[in-house]
Image: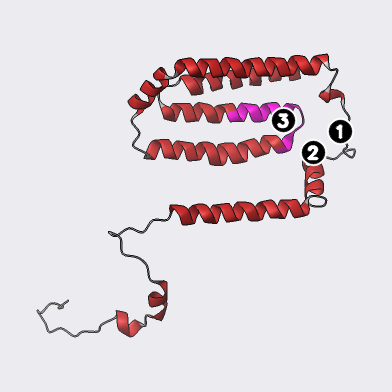
Amino acid sequence: MTAVFVFYLFATLVIASAVMTIASRNPVHSVLWLIFAFFNAAGLFLLIGAEFLAFLLVIVYVGAVAVLFLFVVMMLDVDFAALRAGFARYWFPGLLLTLALLAEIIVAILARESGGIDLASRPVPMAAGESNIEALGRLLYTRYLLIFEVAGIVLLVAMVGAIVLTRRRRSDVRPQNVSAQVRRRPKDAVRLTQPAIGQGVEL
């Protein structure tokens, strides 16, 4: 009974925060509502025993994506009146797309129920007393170790490529010459003077 109450509580909060994310006029408030929705969705994952997905949702989406959105929204000079005008212009195609996605979800649920597929009743191949995080880690670092390392290399290359592509050379900023800084000696940077009394230092 407690689990059912907690499920409906988290589900209601997720739906309400998702609606407020879309309906809020202030984009900062929208991001905060989105963070609240992520936390409640993590609570739903904990109820079904998916601790890894819950921690991943909190660490990755709340700790990185939502905070990044918040800083971007707060730091950029965005004309929110123009954004709202664009939203009002395309509300009808957005409504049609929403209805189409809702119809697809309903059809998928009906197809699963009519086909006799019950994913919840399938046994999970896990050892007794072992959490899903331990099982996932053992499988990831044994059978799929090569794929995991290749995925890490691909993400590293993508990160380096994004930095290289977005790096701009500006004419109003003095570039850094690392080799010249390394070759520089104290005698080139320090000048010892002995000015007379009452006389300042000449630059």
- Seen in the image, is 177 located left or right of residue 110? left
| Residue 9 shows in the view | no
Marks 2/1 in contact by CB < 8 Å: the verdict is yes
Question: Does label 1 or label 3 sit earlier along the sequence?
Answer: 3
1 or 124, which lies in front? 124
Task: Indicate which disc residue 124 carries.
Answer: 1
Q: In this view, does 59 lie to the left or right of 131?
A: left
Upstream in sequence: badge 2 or badge 1: 1
The answer to which image quadrant residue 46 occupies is top right
Judged by depth in the image, the label closer to the viewer, 1 or 3, is 1
Q: Is mark 2 on a helix, strand or loop?
A: helix
Disc number at residue 37? none
Q: In which quarter of the image is residue 9?
A: top right
Q: Mark 3 points at which residue?
A: 46
Whole-number angstrom distance, CA of label 3 to CA of label 2: 11 Å
Q: Position of residue 192 (x, y in %)?
A: 24, 84
Q: Where is residue 151 in the image (x, y as percent from the top left)?
A: 68, 51
Q: Is 180 placed above or below 73 here? A: below
* The residue stretch that appears in magenta: 38-52
Q: Position of residue 150 (x, y in %)?
A: 70, 54
